[in-house]
Amino acid sequence: MDCGSTEAKFRVIATYSETDAYNSTLQAGNQAEGVSLSNPDGSVVYFSKNAPNNVYVAYPNLDYQIEIYDPDAKTAVTLATTSNQVQLIKG
């Protein structure tokens, strides 16, 4: 990849502060192109059929939403739905 390329070839994990992130992530799945999944650990996963490479995860009672971007949509969903792939890091 050339310097300055706008092509997204890297995995990106981001965290966003969001009040009631769990419910807003769950509700996003109710949109026409939305997909939501529940994980055994109680978290909810959302992605849009129009942008399946961007997957969002939220946990009950936490005001944060985690975004997982991967050039391969299947990998992004797998990371979001596989136990212990997304973990809280305490400083």
Image (cartoon, grey):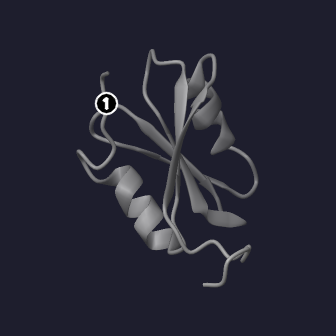
Q: Which residue is mark 1?
A: 89
Location of residue 63 with respect to 65 vertically, above or below: above
- Judged left or right of residue 25, residue 13 is left
Amino acid residing under circle 1: Ile
Snapshot quadrant of residue 69: bottom right
Q: Position of residue 24 (x, y in %)?
A: 64, 29
Of 8 and 19, which appears nearest the observer?
8
- Judged left or right of residue 84, residue 29 is right
Of 58 and 91, which appears nearest the observer?
91
Quarter of the picture holding the C terminus: top left
Location of residue 17 with respect to 86 vertically, above or below: above
Snapshot quadrant of residue 39: top left
Residue that lies at the very extreme toward the left in this rendered image: 84
Q: Position of residue 63 (x, y in %)?
A: 54, 18
Q: Name the residue located 72 percent from the left edge and 77 percent from the top edge.
A: 5
Q: Name the residue located 74 percent from the left edge and 47 percent from the top edge.
A: 31
Location of residue 62 with respect to 45 vertically, above or below: above
Other-residue count near label 1 (Cα within 10 Å), few / some / many at <14 / 14–19 / ≥20: few
Element type at mark 1: loop
Quarter of the picture holding the N terminus: bottom right
Q: Position of residue 15 (x, y in %)?
A: 54, 35
Of 66 and 78, which appears nearest the observer?
66
Q: Name the residue located 40 percent from the left edge and 51 percent from the top edge.
A: 80
